[in-house]
Amino acid sequence: MGLRVLLPTALRHLVGNEEEVQLSGGTVAEVMGDLVAKFPELRKHLYNAEGKLRNFVNVYVNDEDVRYLQDEKTPVKENDVVSIVPSIAGGSIAAIEQTFAGVELSNEEVARYSRHLIMPEVGMEGQKKLKAAKVLLIGTGGLGAPLGLYLSAAGIGRIGLVDFDVVDFSNLQRQVIHSTQDVGRPKLLSAKDKILGINPHIQVDTYETMLRSDNAMEIIREYDVVIDGTDNFQTRYLVNDACVLLGKPNVYGSIFRFEGQASVFYAKEGPCYRCLYPEPPPPGLVPSCAEGGVLGILPGTIGLVQATEAVKLILGRGRTLIGRLLLYDALEMKFRELKLRKNSSCPLCGENPSIKALIDYDQFCGITPPAPVAATHKEEAVDMTPEELKARIDGGTAPLIVDVREPHEFDICRIPNSILIPLGQIPARMNELDKNAEIVVHCKMGGRSAKAADLMRKSGFTNVLNLTGGILRWADKVDPRMPKY
Amino acid sequence: MSDSGKGQALAIKLVARHIEEIRRHGEATYPHECCGLLLGRVVSGEKQVSETYAAQNSREEGAQHNRFLIPPEAVREAEQHARLKKIEILGFYHSHPNAPARPSQFDLDHAWPFYSYVIVSVRDRKSEELTCWRMRDDRSCFDSEEMTRTEE
């Protein structure tokens, strides 16, 4: 049986420039199925990736919208007229809405920002927007350092800093907001001093805390743009979720060795981090910079991409990285980009979200809090402290010491008489060792050696101990002359 | 001229008066988004707009600063109006208050092929850049659409 399907002008060129086509079927679903079977080019315009009619595609049977009948199950009969009717939706690019009414620039500020003021894309209006803007930097490390320096110089009126760490010598290779004389100082104080040294006209708020589920909403709520400069998955998901729940743009960056990534996650306009990575990787699979290293300059490059995106969001100018993931390879000196799509079934920003409040991110990322681990493993005596190891060496009853770090780390420092078997070679080489010998394994901080100990015990080793805190703790507690990295 | 990835290469012709109407509409609804339809005929590969048709922004008040919606009933009403005059829907226009006249990802996610999407940027109640776009048939992106203006 045949009935007429009327098509909007938008689709006619895909059906041979006809205004209507003759199709058959007993229900709307069958007629629509027949339509896309005959004209496959129509499918992507009418149906989304999940095979559902797109929400801007409306079907009428005669003069009735099928949403008010039985939707796609609505029966149709011969001589009915089925019409596809567009609804039209759209909207503007993310511009941070803010009032800058009443914001003025002093003569000193006009002089300071003159190179901005003479650009038509910034001008007085843009500079006032920057002055009215509130930007939160999560972390004042590798990414946070260039972000803090350049955003303060650019005239962002209020900068929030979240960190709880102190400056260490190993930070200075890349965290250019901290100086040698700051080693041992809280990073917040050191960063705040540098920022106000560059630009005394701005306000710096410091939050000396780890960002957690119970404080993130309160801290982030105050700001217009959030920039994630952290290096762990728990915080990345936490920042993403809080930003989606609060409707804030999240400027994302990540770095590893010679490679970096950046994007802008803004659920109002495009995908969020969970659309890209619904699940975190298993713990330990993706090494952090502390484990794998990072070219000192790399966070400068990526941090400044993030700073640029933040300024564009505030100015409402240009095309931001919303919906795009920028990939940077410093060894090849190449930038590439991937298109990111919003996932309509995203549990956070999709059509039927299941996450409506912050969750436990340690648990979500498979990180067991340290305290319970120590408690459950206490009786098995699986750990040895550096002090205990030193006492055993001095007493002439040294166990076999196996260093599971990489050869280039072994070159920097090592515990005397230790042997090197990098973690990746443990499965193949553990048979070189006596299964019943007392063995102490260690790495830089204790993470990799815990995995090695676990592998060895599962293979029948009876007496494997993990050196707590790794060689860094050894250097702190036993051998202060040892270089730390 | 034809490029299969981009679909039919059409240009759009707008009369200066229509451009003025779109600008005035965007300024009048500022800081909310305005929206409307472009009606006319396709004549030898060119979309010739013969009238603009203002629509109500049906989004909720709180979203109108950066979202617009023309529901299907309104599109049908405009279609009927067009049919009587023997013209058809060639595209749509909307404003971007305090934002550039460039299509957003949200625009792309909701776009139809063939139609022209005219966008006017409005800042401080003054219309600025006015651009015209058309989505590729593979939905991958918008291309800038050639726009000619005539006096009448």
Image (cartoon, coloured by chain):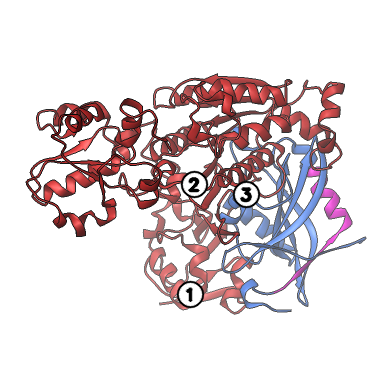
Chain colours: A red, B blue
Identify which residue, A39 or A426, lies in the foreground.
A426
Q: Which residue is mark 1?
A: A40
Quarter of image, res A466: top left
Horizontal side, residue A474 vs residue A345: left or right: left
| Rendering coords of residue B34 (x, y %) | 71, 43
Label annotation for residue A90: 3
Amino acid at dot 1: Pro
Name the spot of residue A9 as percent of width and height, x first. 64, 67
Occupied quadrant, residue A95: top right
Residue A81 visible in the displayed image? no
Residue A294's label in the rendered image is 2
Q: Real-space Cα distance between discs 1 and 3?
A: 26 Å
Q: Secondary structure at mark 2?
A: loop
Q: Name the quadrant of the C terminus of chain A.
A: top left
Whether residue A361 is situated above or below residue A477 in the rendered picture: below
Chain letter behind tag 1:
A
| Mark 1 vs mark 2: in front | 2
Q: Disc number at residue B54?
A: none
